[in-house]
Image (spheres, rainbow, N blue to C red):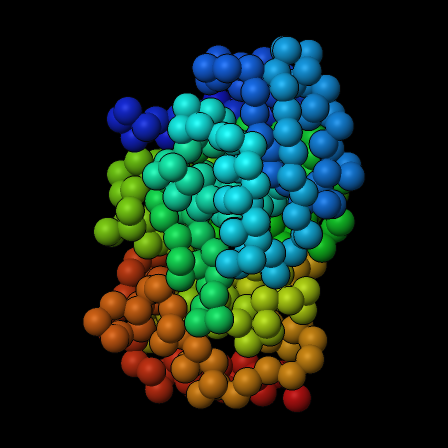
Amino acid sequence: MTTDLVPVALGARSYEVRIGAGLIERAGAEIAPLLRRKRVAVITDDTVASHHLLSLAEALEAQGIAMVALSIPPGEGSKGWEQYARCSEWLLEQKIERRDVVIAFGGGVVGDLVGFACATLRRGVRFVQIPTTLLAQVDSSVGGKTGINTAQGKNLIGAFHQPSLVLADIAVLNTLEPRDFLAGYGEVVKYGLLGDAAFFDWLEINGPAMAAGDMGLRQYAVKRSVEMKAGIVSRDETEEGERALLNLGHTFCHALEKATGYSSRLLHGEGVAIGCALAFELSQRMGLCSQEAPSRVRAHLKAMGTKVDLADIPGDLLDAAGLLALMGQDKKVVDGKLRFILARGIGQAFVADDVPGDLVTAVLTDALRGRS
């Protein structure tokens, strides 16, 4: 299979996202042109390390590149102050300089955490993303959003810090558990829903075969998702306007993640899928789109086997008022008003700053009723 190259056009800070099978085995040759000295620091998590760190080390060694590595515990719980401090201190102990390159080797947690550490270390150190989950390949590794979670909410501490290169090896996706792959699919389907109805049509036809392992379909899905994100980021890097569309489903999602304690009860991509379904339901109740649109969204997500309803989240949840209160802490609050990404139809998302709270409460109340 060939490697697809998707440019992220940001002037002097432009970079490429390279998508294809076998990129980890070629990582040394891919990264070597960026290096001023043949040495890199890799930060990964224990799960990725056990599967893939040896392959990466061999690829670097083949190019004469020395590697030091740190492995952190897997999971959203690592995306906080403790591991941020640990990574930063470790990079300083390794005498990483501004001209060096750090490799973030893992899923979205590792990418966000390591990217933030690199943004603040010596006021900015270069880094390369090697995302190992579907979610990270199509979303979090591209665009330079880095950060950590706090007790107050998700991603409230962070910085925009663009990588120097992204290597998305789709062969790695074969090692994911089915649940983790489907969680990442929540971010894939988001791109069709927010701005490319033809891509959503394609996913309705090809999604099940892609999830079952078809490499050609996987590469196209990752490429199309990255193309959409790269285009939006190049036009609106710091989310002053259009980039907000990438948050489709996320206002609901972040509240649900906080309500479930950022635990394995609800993975981020699962929350995005549920959030997209709720956003289309809210849009339909506001008279913005037809009843067919939310029905199609829900039918497709169910056909894929991902979470789609609040009833799919195990354990207790807050009531509608409690979830609405959590939304008030979200970064997408502007002048105290909740900002939602709504849709006039599939592929027609827009930013809405004037959504009535009682209507959101009604949607959540009905969704919660399905849990009983």
Report the quarter where the C terminus lies. bottom right
Q: Look at the picture and state if 11 lies above or below 155.
A: above
Give how far across and how far down residue 135 sits, in percent. Answer: 57, 47
Residue drawn at point x = 21 percent, y = 71 percent: 335
Q: Nearer the viewer, residue 174 or 163?
A: 163
Q: Is residue 119 left or right of residue 319?
A: left
Residue drawn at point x = 48 percent, y = 56 percent: 148
Residue drawn at point x = 73 percent, y = 25 percent: 55
Q: Is residue 155 left or right of residue 298?
A: left
Q: Is residue 1 left or right of residue 99?
A: right
Report the quarter where the N terminus lies. top right
Q: Look at the picture and state if 281 lies above or below 55.
A: below
Give how far across and how far down residue 117 sits, in percent. Answer: 46, 44
Which residue, as the protein is rendered here, is positioned at the far left? Answer: 335
Q: How many marks?
A: 0
Look at the image and tell me whether residue 247 can be seen.
Answer: yes
Q: Nearer the viewer, residue 71 or 138?
A: 71
Q: Nearer the viewer, residue 123 or 323?
A: 123
Residue drawn at point x = 27 percent, y = 38 percent: 235
Look at the image and tell me whether residue 176 can be seen.
Answer: no
Give how far across and how far down residue 221 sits, in percent. Answer: 56, 37
